[in-house]
Image: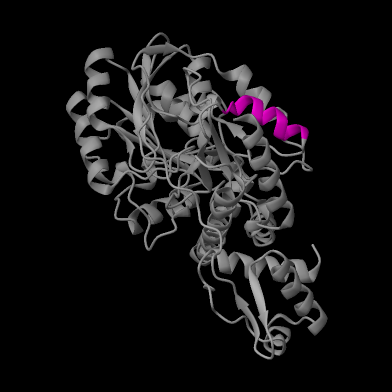
Amino acid sequence: MKRYDILATDIEISIRAGVLRPGDKLPSVRHTCASRGVSASTVFQAYYLLEARGLVQARERSGYFVRAGLRSAPPEPEQASQPAGQSIAVDVSERVFEVLESSMAREVVPLGSAFPSPLLYPLARLGQCLATSAKSLDPWSTVDDLTPGHAGLRRQIALRYLAAGIPVSAEDIVITNGALEALNLCLAAVTRPGGAVVVESPTFYAALQALERMGLHAIEVPTHPREGIDLAALESAIVRHRPQACWLMTTFQNPLGSLMPEAKKKALVALITRHGLPLIEDDVYAELYLGEQRPPPAKAFDTEGLVLHCSSFSKSLAPGYRIGWATPGRFTQAVARHKLTSTLSASVPAQAALALYLERGGFDKHLRKLRAALAMQQTAFAQAVGHYFPPGTRATRPEGGYFLWVELPAGCDALHIHRQALAQGISVAPGPIFSASHAFSHCLRLNYGHAWNTRTEQALATLGQIVAASG
């Protein structure tokens, strides 16, 4: 991007996030030149671009002002899902692979990606920590730090639990190759082939793939797009089907972005405790909250060791390092043994680098910048969906994470839209890959974890046209 395009994009994000409001005056050309270190020509080109986008207007001898009547986000979905409540054999992998493999090319606009932009992370500083820790790596650590993982890193993770008010010992933590391995190890520790597992509806497609691979059935339970799984329906499913476990995301659920209120999380833990049912809690987005403080996980209310809490640094700090962990409660030994007999250990140098980074501080400063960027990008994406998509469209406004769940007007076919969009160089995640029963044929998951710029806006405009033609 050229300098004026970068400047225009930064201002546009501030406008859409409400930092600059209708009627506010933009900083003067002289002030912007000084603060941004750019020429007057660059500032004027940026302001001309914003004017062309309909975001600002020039007033003679007064400067540039934010226009009134800007775009608004679409209404949010209001109803919980309504799955049939049956125990279903899972068969989703081929469809998931087809969608994912077709949208991995770098030239594709990644609205369907499961990952945020790697440019949001302090990879250079992490690289320095990797180099420093590798030089001083104790040769015996390659043996000592096998399962359950690097002692220093487990201590740093335990300290973050403590800061969140959750007393966890370093010995209760098993380091894994990302959160997905942690989740799979926990699933293997508490289930046997032929059993059933409760999942949300919709749910993360990798959870469905794990059930399919291990010969487990899925019990889909109604889930609200803002408050998460329906607890009454959950208890009914437990009594009726006697599942072996639950696999839930209580904080910024993928794909909905729903956040279960604290009181509801407490009630959830009380419910699974009454039934002696293990809860595998996928909590990879918790650090990406957009509010004042991090929501506590269900693990915070667990007194019986039934919650197997899983997370990673992939979404919050170090994409590509593939370092996650499980805090499996009473199942710690079983999870550690599954780890020992499968992949043995996560990368020792990567663990040491993350431990050094956390010891040096700066993680929370990075997180504040990351959350601010995601908050602005969410607003820009939501308003663009409201502007470019046809009437009848609804979209969630999550309080964290980086996904929008978009309900399209009746008659739209998400799989058809996926194929049409891909032909235009745009990826989306169609609703049916998030359901064992292939529901949500009129829904899309959109990723707002990538930069808001002209290319992204054009992609959403094109996608809106495809949706309108599909309805």
Q: Quadrant of residue 275?
A: top left
Residue 402 in the magenta stretch? The answer is no
Vertical placement of residue 448 versus 113, above or below: below
Say how the picture is coloured. Answer: one colour
Vertical placement of residue 45 versus 142, above or below: below
Residue located farthest toward the left when viewing the structure as drawn: 274
Task: Give how far across and how far down residue 105 sits, in percent.
Answer: 77, 37
Task: Locate the N terminus and report the quarter of the image it occupies.
Answer: bottom right
Left or right for 451, reference 79: right
Task: Give how far across and how far down residue 190 sits, in percent.
Answer: 36, 22
Task: Locate the C terminus and report the quarter of the image it occupies.
Answer: top right
Task: Give how far across and how far down residue 23 sits, in percent.
Answer: 54, 78
The reply to whether residue 212 is in sight is: yes
By secondary structure, the bulk of the magenta-drawn segment is best described as helix
Q: Residue at x 55, y 50 (%)?
A: 386
Q: Residue at x 45, y 53 (%)?
A: 287
Range covered by the magenta-colored residues: 412-423
The answer to which of 311 and 410 lies nearer the viewer is 410
Q: Residue at x 59, y 19 (%)?
A: 93
Left or right for 269, reference 402: left
Vertical placement of residue 433 versus 287, above or below: above
